[in-house]
Image (cartoon, rainbow, N blue to C red):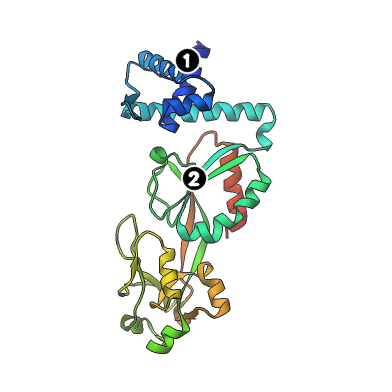
């Protein structure tokens, strides 16, 4: 095999990736234990070798060019594979290490994944975890996440989707609200009630309620004066305050139902659910920390 890189060039690629991750030559220099001038020279050597501009530089910041972002994505994957190869050969593959970046929707973050993260780190103490909590879809290439949990599998064929669970939905309200407005007994009755809405961030559309009628799951568009748009848990908070009816996941309100703070209604039409999917990019060599986290979540939650 013909040699393509010398030690200096490989070091330049590492410093370039550090600068891209931290958006700063100075921060990259501190992380690597070198001078900012050394980082700048390394990037210049790469730009000369590739005959492209990798960064747009100003007096205050640096920003990747389109070519720089494409080169960074490929270089980052290649370096991670080298690190993983060394771990496996040296016997370190039994102890995953490094930083894991995950993106979670608010209900699944707060009521499912965040409570079990200490158990994961107790099992794998060398893994550090960055958690992004949002109901918006993420771009794995641009946002550099290792994996995410979302409500459906995307059309992107470059992603692996594994179902974690079908989460049961319930319709709830406070006893005080039901005392004032009555308890709906049928889907038609919901049209006369204050039904708290949630707007899906990716589309801006109202999320329909799911009920079961005649053995089938059906969608029902309800109406109400209250709507949450970014944080799904806002609807549950409004319901607890007596603002109206809300359909949410049972795991979000199970403590409220147990204490009597909220009451489950429309049980004759219950039993609907929505899935939660674990998403991560196809990778010929998946890092041990990603593989360990995937196995951990499947172990905890998969039906």
Residue 149: percent from the left, percent from the top? 48, 52
- Name the mark nearer the viewer: 2 or 1: 1
- Regarding residue 33, the answer to whether it shows in the image is yes
Q: In terms of depth relative to the viewer, which is nearer, 165 or 130?
A: 130
Q: Mark 1 points at which residue?
A: 9
Q: How many residues crowd mark 1 within 10 Å: few (<14), some (14–19), many (20+)?
A: some
Q: Residue at x 68, y 37 (%)?
A: 94
* Left-right relation of 19 to 118: left
SS at badge 1:
helix
Q: Is residue 2 left or right of residue 246?
A: right
Checking the image for residue 147, the label placed there is 2
> What residue appears at the point 65 percent right and 30 percent down from the top-left corner?
88
Q: Could you tell me how far apart the alpha carbons at marks 2 and 1 are, in whole angstroms?
A: 30 Å
Q: Which residue is drawn at 46% across and 71% down?
A: 272
Q: Where's residue 258, x and y in %?
A: 58, 77
Q: Is residue 225 above or below residue 176?
A: above
Position of 173 compared to 223: left or right?
right
Dot 2: element: strand
Q: Is residue 54 above or below residue 183?
A: above
Residue 182 can be seen in this image: no
């Amino acid at each position: 095999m013909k040699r393509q890189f010398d030690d200096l060039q490989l070091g330049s690629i590492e410093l370039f990736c550090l600068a891209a991750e931290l958006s700063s030559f100075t921060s990259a220099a501190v992380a690597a234990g070198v001078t900012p001038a050394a980082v700048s020279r390394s990037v210049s050597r790469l730009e000369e070798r590739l005959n492209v501009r990798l960064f747009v530089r100003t007096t205050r910041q640096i920003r990747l060019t389109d070519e720089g972002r494409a080169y960074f994505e490929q270089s980052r994957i290649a370096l991670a594979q080298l690190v993983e190869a060394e771990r496996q050969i040296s016997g370190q593959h039994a102890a995953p290490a490094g930083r894991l970046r995950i993106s979670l929707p608010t209900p699944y973050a707060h009521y499912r994944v965040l409570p079990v993260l200490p158990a994961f780190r107790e099992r794998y103490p060398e893994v550090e975890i960055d958690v992004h909590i949002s109901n918006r879809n993420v771009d794995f290439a641009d946002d550099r996440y290792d994996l995410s949990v979302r409500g459906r599998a995307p059309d992107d064929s470059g992603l692996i989707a594994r179902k974690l669970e079908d989460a049961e939905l319930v319709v709830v309200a406070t006893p005080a609200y039901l005392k004032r407005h009555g308890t709906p007994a049928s889907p038609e009755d919901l049209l006369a009630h204050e039904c708290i809405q949630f707007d899906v961030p990716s589309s801006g559309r109202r999320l329909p309620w799911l009920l079961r009628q005649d053995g089938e799951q059906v969608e029902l568009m309800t109406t109400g004066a209250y709507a949450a748009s970014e944080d799904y848990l806002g609807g549950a908070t409004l319901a607890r305050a007596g603002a109206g009816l809300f359909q949410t996941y049972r795991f979000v309100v199970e403590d409220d139902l147990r204490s009597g703070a909220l009451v489950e209604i429309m049980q004759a039409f219950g039993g609907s659910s929505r899935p939660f999917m674990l998403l991560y990019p196809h990778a010929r060599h998946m890092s041990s920390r990603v593989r360990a986290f995937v196995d951990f979540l499947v172990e905890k939650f998969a039906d």
